[in-house]
Amino acid sequence: MSNPLSVLLVNSDSSSRTTIAALLARCRHTVELSATAVSLKEVVKHLESDTPPQVVILEVQSISQGVRDVSTILTIIPHSMIIVTSVEKQPDWILTLIRAGAGEYLTTPINSEELEDALERAARMFEQKQGTETGGKVITVYNPSGGMGTTTISVNLAATLAAKGGTTSLVDLNPFSSDLVAFLDLNPAYTLSSIQETGERVDTSFLMSVMTPHSSGVKVLCGPEEIGLTAEITPNQILNLLTLIRSQFSVTIIDAGGSLSDRNLEIFNGSNLIIYPLLLTLPALNNARRYLKTMNQHGFGPNRVKVVVNRFLPKDDIRIADAEKILGVKIFHTIPNSYVEIKESIYKGTPLAIGYPRSPVTKALTELTGHIMTELDIGSR
């Protein structure tokens, strides 16, 4: 990061504050200790200032108070990184505080390398955030489970956006399978594995050389043929990839899935909007409720995450109002069920917008595209 990473240190022990401050001073990253305090209550006004800290190093002595403090910080500065420090090594402490929204948990006495690693992850997170404010827009279509229509929506969003002008790319970062190849009937010479093999030594020329053009006007970075390789891409590689791709394309669609790993959180950090597709079934809604809650605790709330109901039937037993009550969020859009047309479009390797322009699904996807363009202030390109 070009600017120092601002840090607030909350610790009741003066000796510990001195030790941690010394570690921060020797940190290889540019860190600015903006304030220190004995308790969080002392510095609430600092959190509410025009320049709040990006990182809060928070001492936790009581699990219940720690959860309340984490909640207070995230309510005031939802995109901050909280590094919890505690003498407790019990797994339930770590799990509870991470679920509450803490980004890191370090046991005391603090290991300098662990602190530097945590700050490096924080710096990377804020670098991504800065990136989302400039350059092209990145939209991630994500569901932790397969079968919810993430690839169908990703492909058709990309094709619809490309038809509106500008430059559009589509990236396969879904660990379940490399379905973009089949959905678009592609035979790529290069895939994501080409980028993985080069480590972090990727420039724009190399990136463009490994992307496969599609007749819709979309440039596609296909997933590797080898199962499991996508899950091995590192957060640093994702950061570099999104930084480069944002500089080359007006809009990028990412097809993603899997658990809330560091890898997916890096993708979310670099995304302007996250589309969360689901079906109106109780298992899908229950899973979505859990994941949306956890994503919100990581700073990805309703302002960034939009729920889309896929394969919607108006006469379903579960209504939209029921789904919103279960999830605690508004449904952003619905896409009707049209199994035959979607199946044929996949079989032909042609996006619905091209092969079935009059389909109700195409109409719904076009409307979804319009909502996204309004949400991100993309406008006419």
Image (cartoon, grey):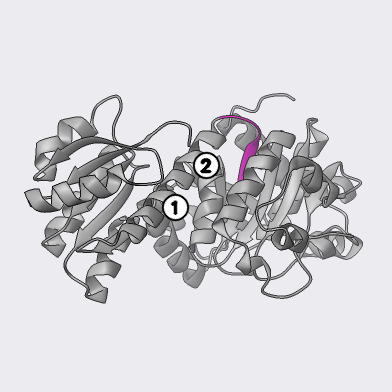
User: Relative to 34, is 170 on the left or the right?
Assistant: right
Magenta range: 134-139
Residue under label 2 = 128
User: Relative to 348, is 280 on the left or the right?
Assistant: left
- Total marks shown come to 2
Q: Name the residue at 62% across, 47% down.
A: 240
Which disc, if any, is residue 363?
Answer: none
Whichever of callouts 2 and 1 sits on the residue coming sooner in the sequence is 2
Residue under label 1 = 321
Label 1 packing within 10 angstroms: few (<14), some (14-19), many (20+)? few
Callout 2: SS: helix
Residue 317: % across, % down: 52, 65
Q: For residue 74, say whether it is visible.
A: no
Residue 247: % across, % down: 69, 34
Q: Name the residue at 18% across, 51% down.
A: 19
Residue type at mark 2 is Gln
Residue type at mark 1 is Ala
Residue 370: % across, % down: 66, 34
- Res 3 quadrant in image: top left
